[in-house]
Each structure stands twice: as structure tokens, then as C-alpha cells.
Amino acid sequence: MNFADLKNKIILIDGGLGTTLHEYGHDTLADPLWSGKVLVKRPDQLVKVHRAFVQAGCDIILSATYQISIDNLMKCCEMSHEQAEETIFNSVTLARQAISEEKAQCFVAASVGPYGAVLCDGSEFNGWYTDSMTIEQFKDWHRPRLAVLARAEPDLIAFETIPSKKEAEALAELLKEYPNLKGWLSFNCQNASTTALGEPIEEAAVSACLKSPDQIIAVGVNCVHPANVVPLIEKLRPLNRDLVAYPNSGVIWDSEKCIFNNQGQALTSYIRSYIDAGVKYIGGCCNVNPNEISAMRHVIDEYLSKKKL
């Protein structure tokens, strides 16, 4: 991956893929595959949404693999093992197709969500399952998806919405099995100081980075409340890593009803504070659509232009 042209630039990540697909008329929120449903059923529509984010001016788009695994593709879609692998591989291909069709300079991050995401019960927002699994069990569970994504050659891996130190450590260890890959690691947090499981975020991040010091290129948070980003990032600044933050719009997920129980808010008013806090990779998660990403692009470019004066 060559970010040479982006060295002194704030890198804009896309928004919430599953929620944007829902806005486009696809029933992703109640589906066990989340955005993966459209990857399987309507890849043309997935490309359409990827293109919308590229048009909005983002520098990185994420694959539709957050909530899919080989096992749940086989179970939910009656696929063979080989078909499930092909589907995961194609997620990167389709993202690159969207970039090519837009003739854009944009990178692809392969999304790797936590084990809790496939449980479809909101577990990524509390990490309750962590104590029942060992590091090796986490690695064994994540390995098949990551192996396929590695073959697809994304520009980097996005380990995202990770609720606990142990799962983060497992992912960092697993990444070393693919020495040509780089990645970022972003935690989910339900407050301004700890992982979703309740551990000090700085301890979780330091421990995970020590497991793979050369391949984890950025650490941070995602799908957090936008007001919590700066205090969380402040705790991560002592790490010798770039910082990443892509909050949701302030929405709260109801896992029983499979809906967000509030409307959220625009992220644009927070962007300047994120830049001032030292965040290099900025984007959006749930309920952040291409229009919002476009507005964020404008704020970022305008603010950086003024800071140079």
C-alpha cells in the first residue's frame, strides 16, 4: 500500500455501508449478513453505493465483509465452502470495480468485524463473549475470512468495532500470518474511556500493537458516539501510531428490534476537533451516508486550507 501522496493529508474513510444500503431500499438491518446480504443478492447495488461514497470524495472504501464469515454464508445462503470463499473474495473486487468506474484515486480496506457481529445480538457493543474464548479460539474463528481477504489483496485490513483487548490481541497476532498485509485496529467503546468490555482503551491498544508492531499502522475507535471521540483519542495519542476515528451519528442500536432508536446528528461540527486531536483517518459508521461524507470532505479541505494560511 502506498500512501505517499496522502502523507500530509487527512484521509477520509467512507460511511456506514449497511445503513446506507438500507437507505437505498435494501433490508440489511435485520439480516444476519448485514451489508453482506447485498454483496450476495445484488452486487450491482453494492457497487452503486461504493461509487456514491467514492463520488463523495473519500480516500478509502470498506468491503462488505463486516458481518460475514464462511460459515454464516454457508448457513444463510446455502453456499458451498468454495462459493462462500468466492463471495468474500469478490467483496474486494467489487470495491475496486467501483473505484475504477469512477476513475478515482481511492483505496480499499477489507472489513473484519468482531466475532460478536455474527451473533446478531449487539454483542460487539458489550463483548460479553470474550471471557468464554481464548486467544487461539479467536484466531481460529477469524482465520478463514482473513485468509480469503488476504488473497484478494486489499490495500489494508480494517479490524473494526472490536469490543475487547483479548480479541484485539488475537487479531494482531493473526495478522502476522500474512506479513504483506497492513491494517488498522479500531475499538468499540460505550463511553469516553474504555473498550465496550470495560477495559482502559489505552491498555488494550498498547497490548494489541505490541503483538504486531510493524503491521498495525493505525489505532482508534469506530461506531462510537461522536462526542466521545476526542477523549478516547487523547488516551491513544502516546502510541506511536496514526489515529483513526469513524463514529456513528450518535445513534443507539436496539438489537432486539433491529433498529436505531434515535435519529442521530451530523458529524460535520465535530470534524475540526478530530483534526486538532491528531486524527489522521476520519470517516463515519452507522447512519453516515454519502451526503454526510461529502460534507465532511468539504469541512476537512476547508479547515486544512485555513490552517496553512
Image (cartoon, helix red, strand yellow):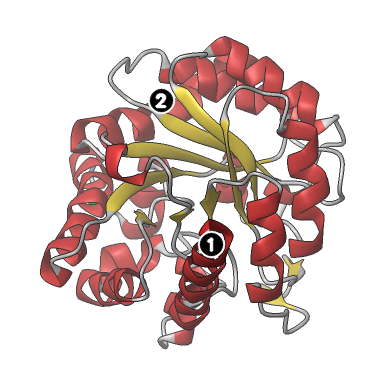
Residue 23 x, y percent position in the rendering: 48, 85
Left or right side of 210 for 79: left
Q: Secondary structure at mark 2?
A: helix
- The reply to whether callout 2 and callout 1 are in contact (CB within 8 Å) is no
Front one among 19 and 246: 246
Point out the frontmost of discs 2 and 1.
1
216 above or below 190? above
Residue 223 placement, left or right of 37: right
Q: Amino acid at mark 1?
A: Leu
Q: Report the disc number at residue 104.
A: none
Camera-side residue: 263 or 244? 244
- Which residue is label 1 attached to? 309
Residue 281 visible in the snapshot = yes
Residue 180 relative to residue 124: left or right? left
Which residue, given by chain and number where applicable, does mark 2 sit on?
143
Q: Residues within 10 Å of mark 2 (few under 14, many from 20)?
A: some
Classify mark 1: residues with Cα within 10 Å, few (<14), some (14-19) or many (20+).
few
Question: Which numbered disc, 2 or 1, marks the residue that appears first in the sequence?
Answer: 2
Element assignment for label 1 = loop
Amino acid bearing label 2: Arg
